[in-house]
Image (tube, grey):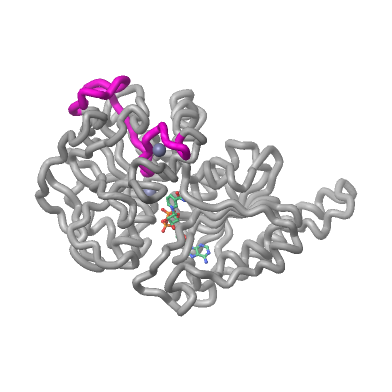
């Protein structure tokens, strides 16, 4: 079968690899109909996670069951399924408490496993034709319809981006009437904005500097903030202040609450320096968020921080350390949540939102391309050129 294989920094090839097969009685084999590229794949692509020669990349597949292991109880051949990025067993101490991203059985000796991800088990990646799905009863989320139907792009985002965006809003406790500031308008930031609006937020700001991504945030119903036009925190305070002024005496002593109730980091360690976006400045966003979140606000960090960065921008960044403005966060009594998405907590409910026509996350997909075009697609996605926001690869074309 064909697969997208890492062969060096910024170098991916489409290669023939041995077919995936059933390895344990609890496995199924999935024939992939869509496989999305994620911002997380870029960390690997750029060599930030070190040498991973031969790694099959990808962790966001949607497809159809091709073969079923003898111990699988609830899944049958030809079922349409999506599986979560974070592989879970469904029965360990963490899975049963809803922390499926910290499964203890999928990558023994560690907490958490994923497809095509260094340090998270030996599972091959999903940018390929056939994927082995372990612990199939726990991982396979069954879906209605046929491959290639109107919901194909909505459903493929259930593998990671939609539940992760939603997870960020859960960590930030976004609720009815809340104001939210999201840094990063990649798939995660955009779907965190979308999820915030689904949860009843009154106002959602999305900060970035890539025009197509900011435009998409606007299409979703958020207020785009372009940091090239000035300090994004000042822009948000100014916009909020203008609205407060219009509301006049409705407000009582709330002038010092000119920021937002909820803040979300949807970027992680590769945050750009606002003064020079060519450069990285890993602590840029935490400082901006600490300034913009109101006293008693909530902060969610969904962006990834690596234990070892192979190309760190400074001494602290080598091991994912950060200079964090604890004093400001403490003084404001800000609640902080962070980490990997426990996909299993949300994917059934989000699937049902899609089926009911209440959520269309697929509207953020910018490109659908053949698997063979993955190397070029990565290049454009990595440089954010030509409107590459979220790319879905199709192994059948
Ligand atoms: N927690 C999880 O389970 C989980 C799951 C999936 C992805 N992630 C992580 O989420 C992050 C985002 O993923 P994505 O697919 O949206 O990636 P992406 O690379 O497409 O998007 C990141 C965006 O951040 C913008 N950006 C960079 N610096 C900025 C700054 N200082 N201010 C505002 N915007 C800035 C970039 O221009 C880009 O549009 C990545 O770190 C990814 O690894 C986490
Ligand atoms: Zn992903
Ligand atoms: Zn488990």
Residue 71 lies in magenta, yes or no?
yes
* Residue ID at (30%, 40%): 61
Q: Residue at x 25, y 49 (%)?
A: 122
Q: Is residue 5 left or right of residue 320?
A: left
Q: Quadrant of the C terminus?
A: top left
Would you say 332 lies left or right of 200 here?
Answer: right
Q: In the image, what residue occupies the spot 16% across and 58% down?
A: 13
One can see residue 281 in this view:
yes
Q: Quadrant of ligand 1?
A: bottom left
Q: Check residue 227 for magenta coloring.
A: no
Position in image of residue 297 (x %, y %) = 71, 52
- Residue depicted at x 58% and y 59%: 225
Which percent across, then down, holds residue 89? Answer: 37, 35
- Nearest the viewer among 330 and 381 is 330
Residue 39 drawn at (x, y percent) = 38, 56
Question: Which image quadrant is residue 299 in?
Answer: bottom right
Q: Magenta stretch?
A: 66-95
């Amino acid at each position: 079968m064909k697969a997208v294989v890492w062969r060096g920094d910024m170098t991916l090839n489409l290669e023939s690899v041995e077919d995936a097969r059933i390895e344990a009685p609890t496995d199924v084999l999935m024939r992939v109909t869509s496989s999305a590229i994620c911002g997380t794949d870029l960390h690997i692509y750029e060599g930030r996670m070190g040498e991973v020669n031969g790694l099959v990349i990808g962790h966001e597949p949607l497809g159809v069951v091709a073969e079923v292991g003898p111990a699988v109880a609830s899944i049958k051949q030809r079922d349409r399924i999506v599986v979560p990025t974070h592989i879970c067993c469904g029965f360990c101490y963490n899975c049963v408490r809803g922390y499926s991203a910290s499964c203890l059985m999928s990558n023994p000796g560690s907490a958490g496993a994923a497809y095509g991800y260094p340090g998270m088990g030996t599972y091959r990646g999903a940018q390929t034709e056939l994927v082995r799905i372990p612990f199939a009863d726990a991982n396979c989320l069954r879906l209605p319809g046929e491959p290639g139907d109107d919901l194909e792009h909505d459903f493929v985002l259930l593998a990671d981006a939609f539940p992760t965006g939603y997870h960020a809003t859960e960590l930030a406790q976004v609720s009815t009437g809340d104001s939210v500031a999201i840094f990063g308008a990649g798939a995660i930031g955009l779907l965190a904005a979308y999820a915030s609006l689904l949860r009843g937020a009154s106002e959602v700001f999305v900060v970035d500097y890539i025009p197509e991504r900011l435009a998409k945030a606007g299409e979703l119903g958020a207020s785009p903030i372009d940091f090239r036009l000035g300090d994004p925190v000042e822009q948000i305070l100014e916009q909020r202040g203008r609205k407060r002024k219009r509301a006049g005496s409705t407000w009582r002593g709330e002038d010092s609450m000119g920021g937002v109730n909820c803040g979300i980091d949807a970027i992680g360690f590769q945050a750009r320096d606002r003064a020079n976006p060519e450069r990285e400045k890993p602590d840029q966003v935490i400082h901006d968020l600490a300034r913009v979140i109101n006293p008693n606000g909530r902060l969610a960090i969904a962006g990834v921080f690596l234990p070892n960065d192979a190309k760190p921008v400074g001494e602290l960044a080598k091991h994912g350390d950060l200079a964090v403005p604890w004093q400001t966060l403490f003084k404001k009594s800000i609640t902080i949540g962070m980490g990997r998405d426990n996909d299993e907590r949300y994917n059934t409910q989000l699937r049902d939102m899609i089926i009911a026509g209440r959520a269309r996350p697929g509207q953020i997909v910018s490109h659908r391309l053949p698997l063979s075009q993955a190397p070029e697609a990565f290049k454009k996605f990595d440089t954010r050129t030509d409107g590459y926001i979220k790319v879905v690869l199709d192994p059948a074309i």
